[in-house]
Amino acid sequence: MKYGIAIFPSKEVQDIANSYRKRYDPNYALIPPHVTIKERFDANESQINDIVKELRNIAKETKPFPLIIKKVSSFHPVTNTVYLKVQPVEELVELSDKLYNDKFPNERQFAFVPHITIGQDLSTDEHSDVYGSLKMHQFDIEDTIDRFQLLYQLDNGSWTVYETFKFGEG
């Protein structure tokens, strides 16, 4: 089964992201706005039980931290993806790094760029228009993150929460 680990920001932040995602993200219905902290990976039932134990330990050692968004950015020219750029605060980077140690499957395919996708699979012209107008916006979003979620992918491509891990709890 496919799994991933993500942070879901507050409803207020999700509402801001969804105001763009409704129009620009074909995956809008498959998963709420989120920050991926571990890319998708395959695991069987016994592996996932060990992973859950390790995630509980990581959550217990992690303190809440700020999620800060000031602007929009893009992965162009690699992909025509537009996103809310999440500042890579030390605690967020450390949390992601812990999910790539030898206790977890999969090596990191991409450098960790914390973000919330608001548009993807855009044509080049559409990307240029959307990114061109949104990069003029200043965002002043700050949220407190106090948990992360282990997700699994359903047959229809949507993602659902397997378990939530609250910081400071085991």
Image (cartoon, rainbow, N blue to C red):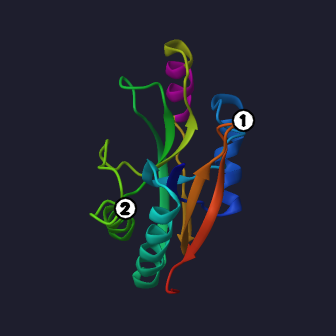
**Above or below, 97 relative to 167:** above
Q: Main secondary structure of the magenta part?
A: helix
Q: What x and y, as percent, mark residue 50?
A: 44, 71
Answer few, some or many: residues within 10 Å of disc 1's Cα (few below 14, many 20 plus, some between 14 and 19). some
Q: Which mark is residue 96?
A: 2
Magenta stretch: includes residue 85: no
Q: Which residue is mark 1?
A: 22
Magenta stretch: includes residue 133: yes
Residue at the (47%, 54%) spot, across then down? 43
Q: What x and y, as percent, mark residue 71?
A: 48, 46
**Above or below, 152 relative to 122:** below
Q: Which mark is residue 81?
A: none
Q: Is residue 9 left or right of residue 38?
A: right
Q: Look at the numbered disc 2 and give the secondary structure of its residue.
A: helix
**Above or below, 64 relative to 107:** below
> Label 1 sits on what residue type?
Lys
What segment carries the magenta color? 127-134
